[in-house]
Image: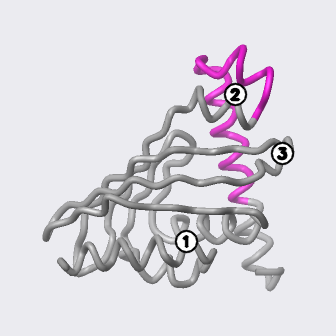
């Protein structure tokens, strides 16, 4: 098995255990993460996973189709969880692309159908407006603010 496939397997196995510390160990210090909601660099990448893992009590992750060579990789994964803001059940289907440096994840891009996600997570507002940039930008701003609050609270010795 290619070492970068092993890295991805280690990352997703840690994610399925909600082990944000092991997930963070898979990232390069200069990592970049992006998806339909977040655009993060450096230490904010593991902070996001820490926030998601510690807040999602019912998170279930399944992954497969791990592929990688010396420079790039990809994976397919799915997550089932309760969206905390609305208490609605979500099943998100994600395709991930990676770039590696020094045996670690340097760039991680997750792609999913935002409209599908918003219908599940937000209910009627997602159904009616999930296609719009206005709703997408509101979700992005709320997520960024939530992550900043989480980082601030946890950097002051708050709960992990």
Most foreground residue, 147 or 84 = 84
Q: Residue furthest left?
A: 70
Question: Residues under labels 3 and 2: Cα distance?
Answer: 14 Å
N-term mark: 3 or 2: 3
Q: Residue furthest top?
A: 128
Looking at the rendered structure, which numbered label has been put on residue 46? none
Q: Which residue is mark 2?
A: 119
Q: Which residue is mark 3?
A: 85
Where disc 1 sits, the SS reads helix
Quadrant of the rendered image containing residue 71: bottom left
Q: Residue at x 22, y 81 (%)?
A: 3
Q: Do residues under tags 3 and 2 come within 8 Å of each other at their CB atoms?
A: no
Quadrant of the rendered image containing residue 37: top right
Quadrant of the rendered image containing residue 132: top right
Q: Which residues are magenta?
A: 122-148
Q: Which residue is mark 1?
A: 15
Where disc 2 sits, the SS reads helix
Left or right: 47, with 125 as reference point:
left
């Amino acid at each position: 098995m290619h070492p970068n496939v092993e890295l991805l397997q280690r990352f997703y196995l840690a994610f399925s255990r909600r082990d944000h510390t092991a997930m963070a160990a898979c990232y390069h210090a200069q990592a970049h993460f992006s998806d339909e909601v977040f655009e993060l660099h450096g230490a904010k990448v593991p902070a996001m996973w820490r926030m998601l893992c510690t807040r999602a009590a019912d998170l279930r992750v399944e992954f497969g189709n791990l592929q990688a060579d010396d420079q790039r990789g990809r994976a397919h994964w799915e997550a089932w969880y309760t969206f905390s803001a609305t208490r609605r059940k979500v099943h998100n289907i994600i395709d991930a692309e990676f770039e590696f440096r020094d045996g670690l994840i340097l760039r991680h891009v997750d792609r999913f159908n935002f409209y599908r996600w918003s219908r599940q997570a937000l209910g009627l507002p997602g159904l009616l407006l999930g296609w719009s940039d206005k709703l997408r930008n509101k979700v992005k701003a709320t997520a960024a603010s939530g992550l900043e609050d989480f980082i601030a609270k946890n950097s002051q010795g708050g709960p992990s």
